Image (cartoon, helix red, strand yellow):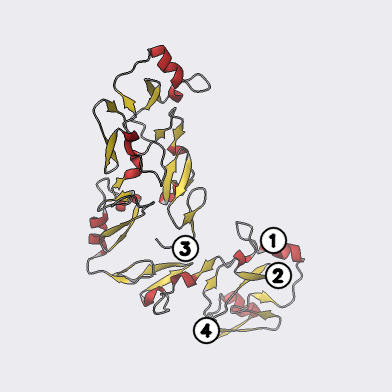
Amino acid sequence: MAECGSMQWMDDRGYCDCGVCECDEGWFGEACQFQEECNLPSKKSRELCRNPQGVVCSNAGTCHCGSCMCHDPDGRGLVTGTYCECDDHECLDEDTGEVCGGHGQCYCGNCYCAAGWHGDKCGFQCDISPWESKQRCTSPDGKICSNRGTCVCGECTCHDVDPSGDWGDIHGDTCECDERSCHATYDRYSDDFCSGHGYCSCGRCICEEGWFGKICQFPRNCEMTDVQSKEQCETGDGVLCSGKGSCHCAQCICSPKDWWVSGEFCECDDRECDKHDGVVCTGNGVCNCGVCYCWDGWTGNACEIWLGTEY
C-alpha cells in the first residue's frame, strides 16, 4: 500500500495509520482517491481519463469517475501516473527482479542511478568519477558523445543506425564519425558513398581526381554552357538553387557556411525540423530535409517520445 497522498485526503476522505490510508465510507483506493458512487456521465468520465494522445488510461488501467485506476496484477504498484502513463516494470532488472538493480530510483519507467552506478538499469559500476567519465566522453566540439551516443563509465556507446562493413554508420571514440554524411540521400541499406567518386573518412568525403563537392558530386570540367547549366538549377519559381547556393554544371552547390541547407536545389533546411524544448529532434534523432528521423526507441514528430526500447 502507498502512503497517503496528502493531508487533505486524510482529513476529508480517511486517515493515515502507519503509512496506510484507512478510507472513510464512500471512498476507496490507496490514497482514498476514488469515490464508490459516481455522478459523472460515462462519456464525461472517459474524456477525463484520456491521455494527451486520446487513449483512455494509456490502455494500462480502467477509468472510474474521471480518474484512472492503473492495473496492478503483481501487487507492486509499478504502473502509475494520472493516466497510467508510467510503467516502472521497465526499470526491473531481468536477473534480480529489483527496481533499477537496487542501485537507483525509478521515475516513470526511467532509472536514476545512485552515484557510481550507470546503465539503463543501473547495472554497471564505475571506478571513475562522473566528472572524469564526462570528460572522456566529450567530443572535440564539446558535446557528450557528439549527441549521437550514450556515455557509460567514460565510454561512448554510439546510436548506430545500421551496420555496414566493419563499422556502423556512427562510430569513433566519442561517436564523432557519421558516415551518413557521405551519402547523397541517406539510405541505411546503401553503401554508395561519395557519389561513387571518392571514399568516406570519418564522415568526410575524400574525392577522386576530377571531382569535388561535399559528396564528390561535381565534375571539375563541364561541357554545358552557363545558360544551359543555370536552367537546370532553377526551381519552379525561377529562383536559382532556392537562393541558397550556386550552380555548377547543372547542379546546385549549397553554401558551405549554411551547413543545415541541403537537397538537389538546396531546398531543405534542417532548422525547420520540429523542436522540443528548443532542441531540433530533441537530440534523439537526425534532421533530414525538415523531417526528424529518430534513433531506435524514440518516436514523435520531434523524437520526443521514449518507447522504452533498449539500444
Label 3 or label 4, whichever comes before in sequence order: 4
User: Residue 1, percent across and down?
Assistant: 54, 82
Q: Could you give the CA–CA distance between mark 2 and mark 1, rounded to whole angstroms? A: 10 Å
Find out whether the residues at labels 3 and 2 contact each other: C-beta distance under 8 Å.
Answer: no
Q: Is residue 166 left or right of residue 14?
A: left
Of callouts 4 and 1, which one flags the residue occurring earlier in the amino acid sequence?
Answer: 4
- Residues marked 2 and 1 touching at CB (< 8 Å): no
Question: Closer to the observer: label 4 or label 1?
Answer: 1
Q: Position of residue 39 (x, y in %)?
A: 77, 70
Amino acid type, label 4: Gly
Frontmost residue, 76 versus 66: 76
| Cα gap from disc 3 to disc 4, whole angstroms | 32 Å
Disc 2 residue type?
Cys
The residue where tag 3 is placed is: 308
Relative to the observer, which residue lies in front, 112 or 204?
A: 204
Q: Which residue is mark 4?
A: 19
The outermost residue toward the bottom is: 18
Determine the secondary structure under disc 2: loop
Look at label 1 and name its amino acid: Glu
Within the image, what quadrant is residue 6 found in? bottom right
Rendering coords of residue 264 (x, y %): 43, 29
Give the labeled residue for mark 1: 47
The quarter of the picture where residue 121 lies is bottom left
Q: Which residue is mark 2?
A: 65
Describe the element under mark 3 as helix, strand or loop: loop
Asked whether residue 80 appears in the rendered view, the answer is: yes
Marks 3 and 1: which is nearer the front?
3
Where residue 8 sits: x, y (%)? Answer: 60, 75
